[in-house]
Amino acid sequence: MVTKVVDLRSDTVTKPSEAMRAAMAAAEVDDDVLGADPTAQRFEAEMARIMGKEAALFVPSGTMGNLVSVLAHCDTRGSEVILGDNSHIHIYENGGIATLGGVHPRTVPNNPDGTMDVDKIVAAIRHRDGAMYYPTTRLICLENTHGNTGGKCLSVEYTDKVGEVAQSHGLKLHIDGARIFNASVALGVPVHRLVRAADSVSVRSNLLAIFLDYATRVRMGYTNIGCVTVFLC
């Protein structure tokens, strides 16, 4: 009798097939920092197209993807990001936005469906005129699907509404989209439509899709964070 173990802890415990290993070994590679890796460039261009954004950046992990996105939008120490109290960025990513970026997390309660009440988001926004006393809000973060609420999908209507709030207050919107393709299938909505309101989105495959205005800043942040990570290790 053959026993086969199915490990459902996370999709991160999956292993590449022999065909995948062969494809990786045969891939044309070069120095991506110098902009010379054709495989990375094609991958980034294709993902930017799929997500409906102007540029994309391949990074080693989803945590780094979220981190460099937050730092690109909150490029002044003492900036503030509004995010769910049960979000992955807030709970599981080792406090990187504060530790490495000096970015203050201002939490809003997550509802059982993964959303945050829009009126509570608005109430949490703190503007520059009070900067002597508290951080200045510069970013709102959403997570779709929302892992800690059982993988609940955020609707396109909700995401658009939060995007409108961000825009009306001069803020940016980042989506932690580690499972955004799952949300796309479940909702029957094209992935580019789900993230249209966002200024940046991180997706599984550890890739950022961003507007071109932030591309250079994010790449610089990625390089610097990489150095810090090596130093800390």
Image (cartoon, rainbow, N blue to C red):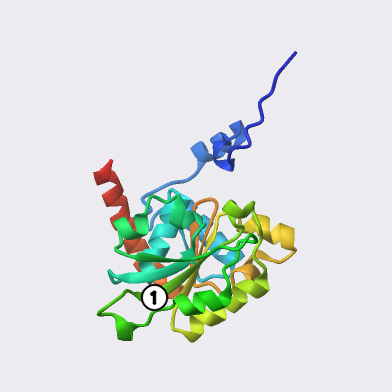
In which quadrant of the rendered image does the C terminus lie? top left
Residue found at the far top of this picture: 1
State the SS at label 1. strand
Relative placement, left or right, of 187 versus 146 is right
**Compared to 233, does 196 lie above or below?**
below
Look at 72% across and 16% down and name the residue there.
2
- Between 96 and 48, the residue placed more toward the observer is 96
In which quadrant of the rendered image does the N terminus lie? top right
Residue 97 coordinates in the image, percent (x, y) = 36, 59
Relative placement, left or right, of 169 versus 158 is left
Question: How crowded is the residue under tag 1: few (<14 C-alpha within 10 Å), some, or many (20+)?
Answer: many
Asked if residue 28 shows in the view, the reply is yes
- Between 174 and 81, the residue placed more toward the observer is 81
Relative placement, left or right, of 231 versus 138 is left
Total marks in image = 1
**Compared to 15, does 205 lie above or below?**
below
- Between 169 and 149, the residue placed more toward the observer is 149
The residue indicated by pointer 1 is 137
Look at 56% across and 81% down and name the residue there.
164
Residue 61 coordinates in the image, percent (x, y) = 45, 49
Look at 39% across and 60% down and name the residue there.
68
